[in-house]
Amino acid sequence: MTVRIPTHELVGLLTDLSLTAADPADSGATAGILLHTARGYLGGSPGKTDVLVGTSTNGYIVGHAHIGCAGQMDPMLWPVADVRAVIAVLKPLAKDKNHGVEIGLDGSTIKVAEDPNLFGEGMALTFTGYDVGEFPLDGVRAMLTEVRMSPPEDSAPVAPRTDFDPALVAPFLKVAARRNSLIEIYRYHQRLPVVIQVGPFYRGMLSPFQWKDEDRSAGVAPAGDVYPLAVPQ
């Protein structure tokens, strides 16, 4: 089974999700992008259509997005190194908004090729995918779908302060810049993952840095000093 996707949309999807995948030097299956198809809504379309869904995580952040496609396929787990190679090849072709590619799976071999109906025997890339069963699907699914509105049991009360590792925030800034969209942040407790929405087709999750609950005064207000200019009356 193969699916057809507009090339510029596939490049955008892979670019965004590569930012939230693990480093290949550190991890196995999480150093990849999980792709699968579903039926969902796009824009103002009144009915469901085929969508290509992508998910990636490094254990601390999650990226999840979808684009339109034609057809359905078995799930695939693309290694990040191969994702970057695919982006490099397809990016020049994506300048033509009418350009399309097909992706398919034969055993563990993934194939990305120009639409044969338009280009015949055109460009084609093949590489070996990771085992989909190795991807932490249950944990990622829980983070994406079970948005907790109340603090964990036996946790400290909700405090205004939430700390983030800048390296974990940076990918979402890049996603928002590429999509030219605002970053919506949904935060419920200083210990719970933060939900990040960028436009209608991208959702992320960001784990906060957990500061010590016993230092309650540190979570009430910023500690930095302020020195406003006193203008003589």
Image (spheres, rainbow, N blue to C red):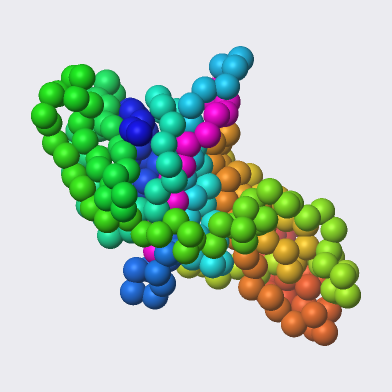
Magenta highlight on residue 38:
yes
Residue in the picture at 54% in, 62% down: 136
65 w.r.t. 215: above or below: above
Q: Which of 195 and 185 lies nearest the eye of the viewer?
A: 195
The x and y percentages for residue 155 are 85, 73
On screen, residue 7 versus residue 30, left or right, reads: left
Magenta highlight on residue 25:
no
Res 10 → quadrant: top left
Note whether residue 118 is visible: yes
The x and y percentages for residue 196 are 61, 49
Residue in the picture at 25% in, 43% down: 111
Q: Residue furthest front?
A: 107
Residue in the picture at 20% in, 31% down: 114
| Viewport quadrant of the N terminus | top left
Note whether residue 175 is visible: no
Q: Residue furthest top?
A: 46
| Viewport quadrant of the C terminus | bottom right
On screen, residue 91 versus residue 186, left or right, reads: left
Q: Which of 37 and 87 lies nearest the eye of the viewer?
A: 37
76 w.r.t. 99: above or below: below
The x and y percentages for residue 15 are 36, 47
118 w.r.t. 16: above or below: above
| SS majority, magenta | strand
The x and y percentages for residue 100 are 27, 27
Q: Which of 7 and 137 lies nearest the eye of the viewer?
A: 137
Give the magenta range.
31-43
159 w.r.t. 5: above or below: below
Res 223 → quadrant: bottom right
Q: Which of 136 and 222 lies nearest the eye of the viewer?
A: 136
Numbered disc total: 0
